[in-house]
Amino acid sequence: MKKQNFELKNEKIKKAFLELKRNSPEKLKNRLKLSWSNWGFGMETLAESAARLEKAGIKYMELHGNHYGEDLGYKAGETLKLLGNHGIKPAGICGMFSNDNDLSSNRAIKRQAALDYIKRELEFAAAVGAKYMLIVPGACGRPEAYDDTEFERSVESLRLVADLFVKYNVKGAIEPIRAAEVSFIHTFHEAKEYIKAVNHPGVCHINGDLYHMQVEESHIAEAIVDAGEMLVNLHMADSNRCALGDGSMDIDTIIMALYLIGYNEGERYITPEPLGPGGAPYPAMYGKPNKGLMEELVIKTANYVREREELLLG
């Protein structure tokens, strides 16, 4: 029987991975850096989140970008102490962009709120040693466009603070999000076009998300390989946006693609963010977490990723 198109693409990725494994085994020595995005844990202390990740053997955390005002958000010294107590290092900052702080807004006050927010987060990121900040060009949870100049307004806004990414040595990482949640920048290709338009060395990376990619990309692993060095962080969830292993996502081919681009080297992370299905996930940040369920989610996901990785590399 003739193979389906996605199977042919899978075979191409697998063949290249096996060649890498056979010819350059030293490039597979280091394992992928497993992180976790903590904002989906809702209203719990950072110490509780860190303890959960430590129990699962996770060494990195993507921190909720919660500096929504001058008096709000994590404090650098306290954060480093709490994470250090559990052997965890900050990986990056999960930038949260809503209607209240929208780079593409047609209301100047909302664009200014986004700029002020980025400034606060970058200062914090530098203080804790976070390596990247996720940026959403338009508000998450707003799939309807304001008008036909959103792209241009967003680019213009981000340019105003782009120098700060260089100053603080934090990678600006654009996240494409499915059309059900944002009005523009849905694919890696569109993220690259946006990055090209910003045209600044501080903003030249991509934050991927498997859940969005399964809707918007023609082939997830192929998009990863095509992104290459631009990809700095990859949010992970299964096809149902739940724990890895609970759906039909082809994790093996994704892992192989990551090794093909040398993702296991340097400051690049795979970061589970299993938020569950829905149109606007941001309300989860203010929810009361089911701690038993969260612990099961984290341990199941971490174990599954490591199991598949070792089966491929061992």
Image (spheres, helix red, strand yellow):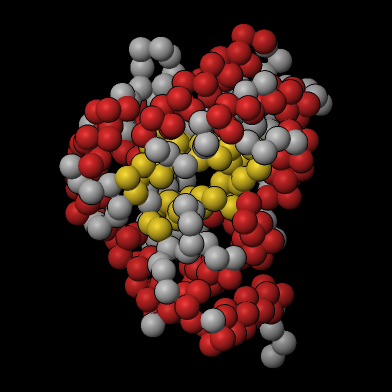
Q: Is residue 271 left or right of residue 307?
A: right
Residue 121 is situated, as x and y percent measured from the top left of the image, at 46, 26
Please report the residue visible at 34 percent of the width from the left and 49 percent of the height from the top. 60
Residue 11 is situated, as x and y percent measured from the top left of the image, at 63, 81
Q: Is residue 21 above or below residue 266?
A: below
Q: Is residue 223 left or right of residue 263?
A: right
* Quarter of the view holding residue 14: bottom right
Q: Is residue 132 above or below residue 98?
A: below
- Which residue sits furthest bottom? 1
Please report the residue visible at 69 percent of the width from the left and 43 percent of the height from the top. 191
Q: Tell me if I can see residue 11 in this picture.
A: yes
Please report the residue visible at 62 percent of the width from the left and 80 percent of the height from the top. 16
Residue 285 is situated, as x and y percent measured from the top left of the image, at 37, 31
Q: Is residue 148 left or right of residue 75?
A: right
Of 130 and 191, nearer the camera is: 130
Please report the residue visible at 71 percent of the width from the left and 40 percent of the height from the top. 195
